[in-house]
Image (tube, helix red, strand yellow):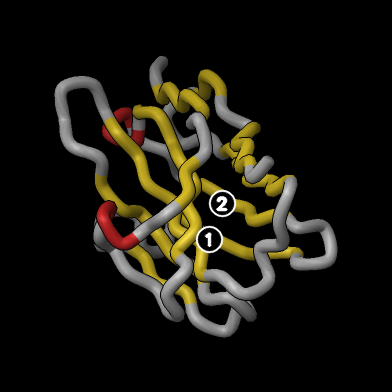
Amino acid sequence: QLQLVESGGGLVQPGGSLRLSCAASGFTLNPYAIGWFRQAPGKEREGTSCISNNGGTTNYANSVQGRFTTTRDNAKNTVYLQMNSLKPEDTGVYYCAVRRVYGCSGSVTSYDYWGQGTQVTVSS
């Protein structure tokens, strides 16, 4: 059974850091670009970052550029999102997603498999 599982979310103060993980089971992540998305209450899901299949290309939304870094360890079949200098507006449920078509995209509809999400709350 194909499964993506996010972990690492939690409650953090403004200015703090979290590292999210996205682990795959039932298939290998090697061939695919992986996107990270978030959804705040009452808002649409939005892309934050994407990493190409070999990790050679990463893209970031303007709102997280310079604060978030996505990496991957294909040997561990896991992708990571390091989030630094967190702000209250970063609060939301964070999802990782697999894109079967080559290359990154910021469009939600371009992704084929999704994890269940992990909650990130930035608050003092």
Q: Which mark is residue 81?
A: 2
Q: Where, quadrant-wise, is the C terminus in this rendering?
A: top left
* Residue pictured at 40% horizontal, 29% vertical: 93
Counting from the top left corner in percent of width and height, residue 111 is at 38, 57
Give the number of the disc on residue 69.
Answer: 1
Residue lying at the far top of the rendered structure: 124
Q: Position of residue 57 (x, y in %)?
A: 50, 81
In the structure shown, which secondary structural element does the residue marked by tag 1 occupy? strand
Dot 2, crowdedness within 10 Å: few (<14), some or many (≥20)?
A: many
Pinpoint residue 38: horizontal percent, then vertical percent. 35, 39
Residue type indicated by callout 2: Leu
Tell whether label 2 touches label 1 (CB within 8 Å): yes
Is residue 116 depicted above or below 32 in this figure?
above
The answer to which image quadrant residue 102 occupies is bottom left
Pick the residue in front: 16 or 119.
119
Front residue of 38/121: it is: 38
Q: Is residue 1 left or right of residue 86?
A: right
Q: Amino acid at mark 1?
A: Thr
| Element marked by disc 2 | strand
Q: Is residue 62 left or right of residue 103?
A: left
Extreme residue in the right direction: 75
Where 49 sits versus 117, above or below? below
Q: Spot the residue most to the bottom.
A: 56
Residue name at image x 26 percent, y 47 percent: 46
